Amino acid sequence: MQQKFYSHPTAVIDEGATIGDGTSIWHFTHIMKDSFIGNNCTIGQNVFVANHVLLGNNVKVQNNVSLYEGVTCEDDVFLGPSCVFTNVINPRSAVSRKYEFKKTFVKKGATIGANATILCGITIHEFAFIGAGAVVTKDVPAYALVVGNPAKQNGWMSEHGNKLQFNKDGVAVCETTGETFRLQNNSVIKL
């Protein structure tokens, strides 16, 4: 059967990994068995994808990202350069905790900026935007913009990646697409 994805000759893809059509895997990347990568993904240079990691379609993983067991990214997720995921809350070299891996979910359309750190066991909801260098220690609501260490909410983002400016009636319009959003009960709803 002909391979329907591209992999650079230096990439290591273990037997048993599932990789979708149109995906590109670049230099010095390691994809472990039992991982799943969807269609039309881009996996950058020096990326590690562990066993049982799930990546949806059209996921962009920039250089130097390690995706450890327990991480699931839905469709259209962007993972910025050198962002970091964890899978154990209290690691110790002398204590095996491989049966204590916590699951981390990155929902559809979310962005994680360069050098951000994501603690395990949390959910980053749809179209959330994690600023560069943020340290995320708790769940992030849909459309929320979070920055800093520890990450704190600093606004709301459109699906196109523009900061939303809400009027006195709690309505905002994406300046690029014209899509309308409503702020209601400290959450954003696309109208």
Image: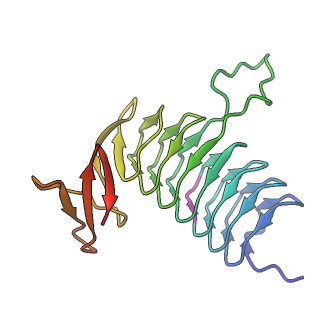
Q: Position of residue 43 (x, y in %)?
A: 63, 62
101 horizontally vs 75: left or right: right
Q: How many marks?
A: 0
> Magenta-highlighted stretch: main secondary structure?
loop
112 horizontally vs 178: left or right: right
Residue furthest toward the top?
Answer: 94
Q: Position of residue 149 (x, y in %)?
A: 39, 30
Residue 24's place in the image compared with 158, above or below, is: below
Q: Which corner quadrant holds the N terminus?
A: bottom right
Q: Position of residue 9 (x, y in %)?
A: 78, 68
Residue 5, image quadrant: bottom right
Residue 59's place in the image compared with 84, above or below, is: below
Residue 96, image quadrant: top right
Between 66 and 179, the one nearer to me in the picture: 179
Q: Is residue 132 magenta?
A: no
Between 117 and 9, the one nearer to me in the picture: 117
Between 163 and 79, the one nearer to me in the picture: 163
Residue at 24 percent across and 74 percent down: it is 178
Residue at 77 percent across and 25 percent down: it is 97
Between 129 and 2, the one nearer to me in the picture: 129
Residue 18, image quadrant: bottom right
What segment is highlighted magenta in the picture?
Answer: 59-63
Residue at 23 percent across and 57 percent down: it is 164
Residue furthest toward the front?
Answer: 185
Residue furthest toward the left?
Answer: 168
Residue furthest toward the bottom?
Answer: 2
Q: Which corner quadrant holds the C terminus?
A: bottom left
